[in-house]
């Protein structure tokens, strides 16, 4: 694959992280660069850009490194990803995995497990 096509597929993945392989392939064809959606996927795999999460991470790294300003579409994609993450119960934590180890307490101060046993008696 010509290097200019690969570079363009990587650049467009970062510029438009919400776009899929088919849309990127079509956009590149409009600029005279012929690549199939499967070809876009192969390029993205080589550059760890296959998921939107990876492409957004690459965008954030580019913004931090180059000091560029994000477009409205890029900001919208980042905000949507954060909203989706929150809607599915994901959140950032200093101690990943610790949330599952915490115990819930009822109004009486007893652990939920022991209070539910008492209510069944």
Image: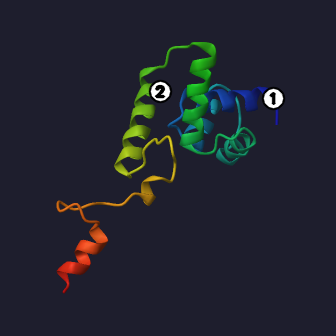
Q: Which residue is mark 2?
A: 74
Nearer the observer, 118 or 57: 118
Q: Tell me the residue at 70%/30% (across/down).
A: 33
Q: Tell me the residue at 45%/32% (across/down).
A: 78
Q: Position of residue 98 (x, y in %)?
A: 47, 53
Q: How is the image coloured?
A: rainbow
78 lies left or right of 104: right
Q: Quick one: label 2 or label 1, which is nearer the N terminus? A: 1
In the rendered structure, are the residues bearing label 2 and label 1 in contact, judged by CB atoms less than 8 Å apart?
A: no
> Based on the displayed image, in which of its 4 quarters is residue 63 positioned?
top right
Of the numbered discs in the image, which one, if any, rests on residue 3? 1
> Based on the displayed image, in which of its 4 quarters is residue 22 positioned?
top right
Nearer the observer, 34 or 91: 91
Q: CA distance from mark 2 to mark 1?
A: 25 Å
In the image, is residue 92 above or below residue 111? above
Q: Where, quadrant-wise, is the C terminus in this rendering?
A: bottom left
Residue situated furthest front in the rendering: 109
In the image, is residue 66 above or below residue 84? above
Total marks drawn? Answer: 2
87 lies left or right of 18: left
Q: Tell me the residue at 62%/14% (across/down).
A: 66
């Amino acid at each position: 694959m010509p290097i200019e096509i690969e570079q363009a597929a990587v650049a467009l993945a970062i510029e438009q992280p919400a776009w899929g392989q088919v849309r990127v392939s079509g956009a590149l064809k409009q600029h005279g660069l012929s690549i199939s959606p499967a070809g876009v996927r192969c390029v993205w795999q080589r550059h760890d850009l296959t998921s939107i999460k990876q492409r957004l991470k690459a965008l954030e790294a580019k913004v931090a490194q180059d000091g560029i300003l994000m477009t409205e579409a890029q900001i919208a994609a980042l905000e949507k990803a954060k909203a989706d993450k929150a809607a599915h119960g994901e959140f950032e934590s200093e101690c990943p995995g610790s949330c599952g180890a915490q115990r819930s307490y009822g109004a009486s101060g007893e652990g939920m497990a022991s209070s539910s046993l008492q209510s069944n008696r």
